[in-house]
Image (spheres, rainbow, N blue to C red):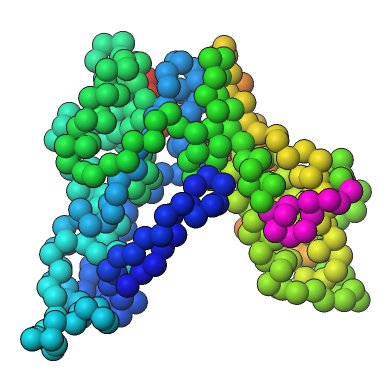
Amino acid sequence: MLYRNKKDERGVVVRNKERLVAQGYRQEEGIDYDEVFAHVARIEAIRIFLAFASYIGFIVYQVDVKSAFLYGTIDEEVYVSQPPGFVDPKFPKKVYKVEKALYGLHQAPRAWYATLSTFLLKSGYGRGTIDKTLFIKKDKNDIMLVQVYVDDIIFGSTKRSWCDEFEALMKSKFQMSSMGELTFFLGLQVKQKEDGIFISQDKYVVEILKKFDFASVKTASTPIETQKSLTKDEEAAGVDVHLYRSMIGSLMHLTASRPDIMFAVCACSRFQVTLKTSHLHVVERIFRYLKGKPKLGLWYPRVSSFDLEAYSDSDYAGANLDRKSTTRGCQFLGMRLISWQCKKQTIMATSTTEAEYVATANCCGQVLWIQNQMLKYAL
């Protein structure tokens, strides 16, 4: 049995759920499963979806599939034992043969995606070439977009009747929970307004400030000091590695809507093994910065072009430990920031030119992905 809490956007438990699950960790590759890969939407794809919705001006809605994995059909022959407390007294040594996917099976996500995608394709929807979790229907100047993230589905259209038809179509096949206009998705708060869409995580900021006891600290004007770089600092005292990694993990989740802390978080994440008090102080500064600016986010205005613009930059040997360079870049659709990067390069650049070329190549790869994704959005 699996006990799972259903939480709302504030993290408050609204319902306790219980279901039968398989012990997938006991499955053997080649016997119990073959292919387990399932397509999952990138966070950039979600931002492009919302950017396009703000540009066209349609409302985005959300539905949730109840017990989605149970709809998938598996091809392999799989057996599960009777769950403790529910053993048939007449046949205590019997096992169940699984025909539908169960939660816990390695192939369950793939089986669910195959079931959903097959259903949508038969219903007249086209599938994205680059993003296989994007489904589209077009007719002259009208378009219907459906973005899938496992069992959470967001959709919108230039014709409101198409949204109603899609919801009815899904309910005819699956048990659904209609959640109305999109307000919360993948940890992102979404406010849809007449003049644009605002994406933020301010409730999450309040939550982590309270979790790590930064609710009443002095604020900082910047997330990191610009004149002082991070070093090993071997003479400083050590700190609790679990606390440090928990703080870094919480901040990494926040970078989905806060590019302003991206560089500082990535710099601190490099010291999760040899961490000292000096590194903890830098992480604490990020939290103090968030305390002063908890409600920053991404604004996607309605009145703006939809031209793709990209920027790329790199330092040279900026990392003190191994003298590697750091790639930085961002991509816009008009005035809408939809993607950004800050990552240490894997090679040791021998010149500033080489470091810039590596950063440019990384940026071009992201631009090509966005460009190919946008070809499916074209009306």
**Residue 120 appears in the rendering:** no
Residue lying at 37% horizontally and 25% vertically, measured from the top left: 156
Residue lying at 86% horizontally and 65% vertically, measured from the top left: 278
Q: Which residue ends up furthest to the left in the rendered image?
A: 90
Q: In this view of the protein, which residue sits in the foreground, 131 or 279?
A: 279
Question: x and y percent of residue 358 in the render?
Answer: 62, 46
Rendering quarter of residue 328 = top right
Question: x and y percent of residue 355 in the render?
Answer: 69, 47
The residue stretch that appears in magenta: 208-218
Residue lying at 87% horizontally and 76% vertically, measured from the top left: 237
Q: Is 321 one of the magenta-colored residues?
A: no
Q: In this view of the protein, which residue sits in the foreground, 17 or 344?
A: 17
Q: Quadrant of the C terminus?
A: top left
Question: x and y percent of residue 363 in the render?
Answer: 58, 38
Q: Quadrant of the N terminus?
A: bottom left
* Residue 91 position (above or below residue 334): below
Q: In this view of the protein, which residue sits in the foreground, 179 or 293?
A: 179
> Which SS does the magenta portion mostly show?
loop
* Residue 207 position (above or below residue 134): below
In this figure, what is the number of numbered marks?
0
Q: Is 210 one of the magenta-colored residues?
A: yes
**Residue 178 appears in the rendering:** yes
User: Position of 307 compared to 80: left or right?
Assistant: right
Q: In this view of the protein, which residue sits in the foreground, 88 or 332?
A: 88
